[in-house]
Image: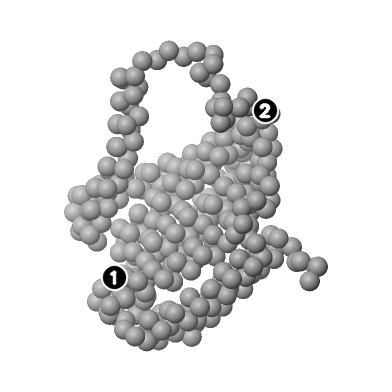
Amino acid sequence: MGNIGGGLVFLVFALVTVFSAYLVISSRNIIHSALFLILTFIGVAALYAMLDADFLAMVQLLVYAGAISIMVVFGVMLTLRGGPENSNGDTRNAIGGAIAALLTFVVLGMVIFTNSAWLTTGTGISGGSTVSDVSWLLLTKYVVPFEVAAVLLLVAMVGAIILAKGVDDSK
Amino acid sequence: MVDNFGAIGIILIFAILFPIVMLAIPKMVAPRKPGKEKETTYECGMETRGETWIQFKTNYFLYALVFVAFDVETIFLYPWAVQFRKLGTFAFVEMFIFIAILLVGFWYAWKEGALEWK
């Protein structure tokens, strides 16, 4: 850890992430943009894994590379009219976007480098990975929020079905 | 941590290299004789009609939404499955309650015909 190999792996995944993120906005074909977005999510997941946040990496893969990208692809498929050529039009607000991105970086950098408290990783409670810590807390101390999350998911699922299918008035 | 992911890294390298090699071999070995009939779009032997890129029916969005709900459920199952042996009976019962609550959603989706492919 912290050797040249680790740095090389980080460099590879950082380059993949940044380059695919650039291709998301520069691709003419919006389907390609969506696919590169998935690659960006996977690259970010790899960076999380390198930061010892293995649970977060798993969530990133499942939720972003799995669920969110499915939503994006469906959104594209549902709204796309005609062929995919030139479906991702010109970016007109390049200068404004550059300024906004720069300001975001400046603010994030200020927050990160002026608060040194959370730069160091905390020590886990179970001595294992973050997955075991999360499972330990989730199923012992925070059991009630855990079950509430199940109810929340249930409501979300039923709500999604009602939204997509409409309420059946015949009954 | 990087060392722990070494095995995944090796699989990743193979997963990237293997398709490239598999695609490169036919390119080099197979004879190429393109013809007009060969280059038409294959669609179960029928003549293709209309545009390839058509708008999806909005009904299919339902499958995406239900998938996302079950996907998020998997996130809660994952840490439990990893630490299954250490957590003991209480966690086992807890997880069954969790799954039972979500089975209600599954039952509702089934009842509403959300899982039927039309």
Label 2 resides on the chain identified as: B
User: Which is nearer the eye, B34 or B112?
Assistant: B112
Answer with left or right where residue A163 lies relative to residue A40.
right
Whether residue A146 is visible, yes or no, is no
The structure residue drawn at horizontal position 44% and vertical position 59%, both measured from the top left corner, is A62
The structure residue drawn at horizontal position 58% and vertical position 39%, both measured from the top left corner, is A30
User: Which is nearer the eye, A32 or A170?
Assistant: A170
Answer with left or right where residue A42 lies relative to residue A104.
left
Mark 2, residue position: B49
The amino acid beneath tag 1 is Ser
Answer with left or right where residue A81 lies relative to residue B97.
right
Q: Residues within 10 Å of mark 1 (few under 14, many from 20)?
A: some
The amino acid beneath tag 2 is Arg
Label 1 resides on the chain identified as: A
Q: Residues within 10 Å of mark 2 (few under 14, many from 20)?
A: few
Q: Quadrant of residue B47?
A: top right
Depicted B105 relative to depicted B113: above or below: below
Q: Position of residue A150 (x, y in %)?
A: 52, 76
Image quarter where the N terminus of chain B lies is bottom left
Q: Which mark is residue A129?
A: 1
Most extreme residue toward the front, as rendered? B45
* Same chain check for tags 1 and 2: no
Answer with left or right where residue A51 lies relative to residue A5.
right
Q: Secondary structure at mark 2?
A: loop
The structure residue drawn at horizontal position 38% and vertical position 68%, both measured from the top left corner, is B78
